[in-house]
Image (tube, rainbow, N blue to C red):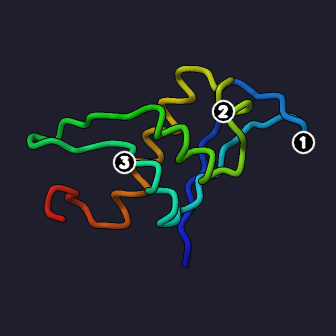
Amino acid sequence: MAKSKSISLGAVLDTHKGPLKELVLNEPRARTFRKGEPFKIRSGGEIEWNNDIVLAFLQDMTGHDSIVLDDLSAADFLKARNGLLELLVAEIGSDPLEV
C-alpha cells in the first residue's frame, strides 16, 4: 500500500486548479530515482541535499509541475523537503544508516 504525507503550506499557492493550501506527498516510484538521489546521509547523521533533485521528486510525488513548486516559500520548501525525508526514511526503518 502506497504511503503519503500531507504538508500544510504557510503561503497559499495559486494554481490553474485554484488555491493550493496543502501538498500531498505520495510515495515515489523507482522511476523517480532515475533523476538521482535527493539526499545523502553521511556518517554522524549529516544530510547532504540535492535541491534540484528534491524538486524533481516533489513534482513526481505531488503531481504539481515546476511552475507551481518553484513558487513555494522557503519555509514551505523546507517543510516539503523534510516531509520527503520522513516518508523515505519511514519506508526503510528508523535508522537509515543501517540499510
Callout in the foreground (1, 3): 3
**Where on the picture, by quarter, is residue 92?**
bottom left
In-image side of 44 versus 13 (left or right): left
Vertical placement of residue 84 versus 54, above or below: below
Which label's residue is closer to the chain start, 1 or 3?
Answer: 1
Q: Which residue is mark 1?
A: 17
Identify the residue position indicated by label 2 in the image: 69
Identified by mark 3, the residue type is Glu
Cα–Cα span, label 1 and label 3: 30 Å
Q: Is residue 13 above or below residue 38?
A: above
Q: Residues within 10 Å of mark 3 (few under 14, many from 20)?
A: some
Q: Secondary structure at mark 3?
A: loop
Mark 2 and mark 3: Cα distance apart in space: 19 Å
Nearer the camera: disc 2 or disc 3: 3
Relative image position of residue 37 (x, y in whole percent): 36, 48
The residue that label 3 is drawn on is 37
Q: Quick one: 46 or 53, which is closer to the camera?
A: 53
- Which of the marked residues, 1 or 2, is nearer the chain's N terminus? 1
